[in-house]
Image: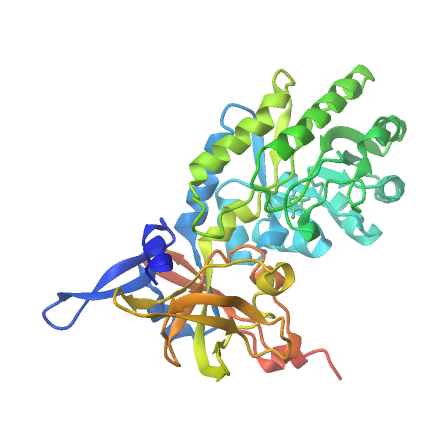
Amino acid sequence: MSRTARRGIERPPAFIYREQRSGLLRRKSESLALFCDEIPLQRLADSFGTPLYVYSATAIRERLQIFRHAFRRVPHTICYSVKANSSLGILRLIGAAGCGFDVVSGGEMERVLRVDRCAAKRVVFSGVGKTSEEMTAALKVRILLFNVESESELWALAECAARSKEKARIALRVNPDVPANTHPYISTGLQQHKFGVPIGEARKLYAQAAGNRYLEVAGVSVHIGSQISEVDPFSAAMERVADLVRELRRDGHRIDYIDAGGGLGIAYDQSESDDFEVSAGEYAEGLLRPLRGLRVHLLLEPGRAIVGPAGALLTHVLYRKTNKDKKFVVVDAAMNDFLRPSLYEAYHEIVPLRFRKQDALEKVDVVGPVCESGDFFARDRALPVTSEGDVFAILDAGAYGMALASNYNTRPRPAEVLVDGGSVRVIRRRETISDLLRGES
Ligand SMILES: *Cc1c(COP(=O)(O)O)cnc(C)c1O
């Protein structure tokens, strides 16, 4: 195994292996145990059961700090993208660190307000299909900015604002027609994607918006996709946005904000290095270069980059089975708990909670109990030989993990715990079957 394990050892700071001393004499043993902050993960699996999402508060705070530091030279607000992980305990932590929020539904806005009634002034609302009810609710609490994605939405918003006797602060989300080298499902900045208004049509729409007394033009917004690991697409989009801002200002609009969206990728495969200070620094440099001299307040909507590496999903081995020469490890988590491998064929590092350096490796498929062949976490992966009952951690599961979980196969969703140094808090109890059946008749 050494591959994953050694890399595991190198992973600072959320999930790392430590030598575990055992026995009365506390002699150094050969065995390594995976920790989250100060807590051995096996203890969490024993106390709370599996599947279990575990997050490191320290890692989330640290990543926010690094991200913020990268943009320290310009006025900016981090509006954490709620859809990456919308659990209240996570939102509370991020809100307490002074961040705003990017929401894409009335439900997400409600979550943010539950955590902090006063957070509305730091909320931006994105999404191609906002309903009148959602927009009216957002107007009522006076959010910072609506990222409007179509002409029809613009007029619907103006109507809601007129009815509420409120003025809606808007940015148009422009579609810069810039390719981002990422999975097609999470690429959003090309003209064939449903997102945003074509950048060439934006000026006309801004002029129309400015003529409406219930709309207040305040910014330009863009988001070209997710899990983008190169800087060039971000820079290219920003160049187009910067040109547009200059044109709009010449047209007489007041543009205070540029919302640069999210999308900064993380290294899921540990053969790539993941030095967040480096990647956040390069990302900031790439965004800021085209904006030089523009004097705007920058809004940033990172999701994955903040919470992804700060979370892991613990799952235990139910059964081992062999079909001819194919070996399967059947675990108790499934695609309903963690969809990324099934949906995007995403690679996630899988490591045992305990291992000894001399453990042999074997090639296995790690699969869940759901009745679909697409229900897998890894295929033909070399992992240390494990026994039934052993627990694995699926790493980098903090973003788009629990947020995408479902009840497919009538499976209750996992519990979530937040580790903060030496303390552990359950931030969502495990769902029960009766939770699932409530509301049905
Ligand atoms: C999903 C999304 C984000 C966050 O993307 P990440 O890749 O998680 O950083 C930000 N802004 C908008 C509009 C989004 O849809």
Rendered image quadrant of residue 46 = bottom left
Give me the residue at 56% from left, 72% from top: 334
Residue 187 sits above or below residue 435 on the image? above
- Residue 316, position as x, y percentages in the image: 43, 75
Q: In this view, does 256 lie to the left or right of 363?
A: right
Q: Which residue lies furthest to the left in this view?
A: 25
- Residue 350, position as x, y percentages in the image: 44, 63
Whether residue 386 is visible, yes or no, is yes
Whether residue 421 is visible, yes or no, is no
* Residue nearer the viewer, 391 or 37: 391
- Image quadrant where one finds the C terminus: bottom right
Give me the residue at 44% from left, 70% from top: 363
- Residue 338, position as x, y percentages in the image: 57, 65
The number of numbered badges drawn on the structure is: 0
Residue 192 sits above or below residue 385 on the image? above
Rendered image quadrant of residue 406 = bottom right
Q: Which colour scheme is used?
A: rainbow
* Residue nearer the viewer, 284 or 69: 284
- Image quadrant where one finds the N terminus: bottom left
- Residue 301, position as x, y percentages in the image: 61, 41
* Residue nearer the viewer, 190 or 15: 190
Q: Is residue 219 left or right of residue 315?
A: right
